Amino acid sequence: MPIFDVDEVTPSTQASALISPRKNKGRKAFKTVPDEFFGVYCLISRSQLKHYKNRCYIGYTVDPNRRIQQHNAGREKGGAKKTDNRGPWDMVCIIHGFPNSIAALRFEWAWQNPEKSRVIRDLSLKKARKETPFAYRLRIACHLMNCRPWNQFALTFRWLLPMEELPFPENILPPKHTLLKYGLIEKSTTEISCEYSDYIEKGECRLCDEEIVKLSHLVRCTSCAAHFHAGCLAINGLAGQRNLLYPVLGDCPRCSQSYIWGDVIRDQRMILRVSEAQTNTALKEMVPRTHSS
């Protein structure tokens, strides 16, 4: 079964699929950069017209809140041709955590076109006679999440409307490292502090003991924040596996806590975005502190 994690957020209406971040009261305000978000969602039509009611639409977004509003506002406001005048629509679930837009867009296309996707077309997936359109789409999504390259990513399956939750097909559950969450998506940003005390040096790799020269070579444990060369941690996590370039899951050689490689790389990309936006040149090659560092 996927990892179970319930957010302390529940939706009241489908007016939004995302909420604003909690404010840090009493903390000095710094410039921020938005954290990356790439998601593929499923809409269900609530149209009163029999021909459109319960139809599904699969789409890609970097902003779920804006996207559901566009779909329900119509094509003139940025909605899709296939959703225009066929709603109102509910964004029932979203799969997010893709490492980039290309990976998400490929997943979107395969979810839309299972009969054409080279990843699952040989399965010849068809909607069963008593299966709802959404149950069929959920089954396709589960197959895709278990296929490469997507089964190697740190994905989250989120029920935006928990009351619409369906059980995953028993014969094709999401990968074990997939997070299962409920509720609205919280906007998240990362602060770009100008305080030296909020940064540490790259230092040495905890595996090879060599200096980490470039910030782009650094990754850190998501639990203890120990620093490593990306290549060193990947080799250590693979533990001799030769058919992969990087591990899906691994154990930190310093604290022994498990990590998901996709989360490690997401953290690395955040460090590089902070460096790029940093105006203090003395801090550009330093590493933002975490609670563990």
Image (spheres, rainbow, N blue to C red):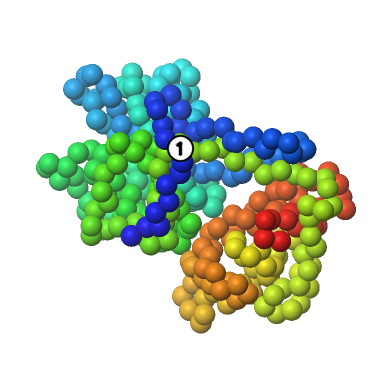
> Residue 210 placed where, x, y %?
76, 77
> Which residue is most to the bottom?
240
> Which residue is most to the front?
26
In this orientation, does residue 202 appear?
yes
At x 67%, y 56%, the residue is 291
Occupied quadrant, residue 71? top left
Q: Quadrant of the C terminus?
A: bottom right
> Residue 170 placed where, x, y %?
23, 57
Q: Is label 1 in a helix, a strand or a loop?
A: loop
Image height of 14 relative to 105, above or below: above
The one of 157 and 255 positioned closer to us in this rendering: 255
The one of 152 and 32 positioned closer to us in this rendering: 32
The one of 17 and 217 positioned closer to us in this rendering: 17
> How many marks on residues?
1
In this orientation, does residue 245 appear?
no
Image height of 160 relative to 1, above or below: above
- Relative to 218, is 101 on the left or the right? left
> Residue 64 placed where, x, y %?
48, 34
Question: What kind of residue is marked 1?
Answer: Val
Occupied quadrant, residue 57? top left
> Would you call the spot at circle 1 few (<14 residues within 10 Å), some (14-19), or many (20 or more)?
few
> Residue 99 placed where, x, y %?
54, 52
At x 25%, y 48%, the residue is 167
Check disc 1 and report the residue beneath it.
9
At x 11%, y 42%, the residue is 129
Occupied quadrant, residue 88? top left
Image height of 192 relative to 209, above or below: above
Q: Quadrant of the N terminus?
A: bottom left
At x 59%, y 36%, the residue is 21
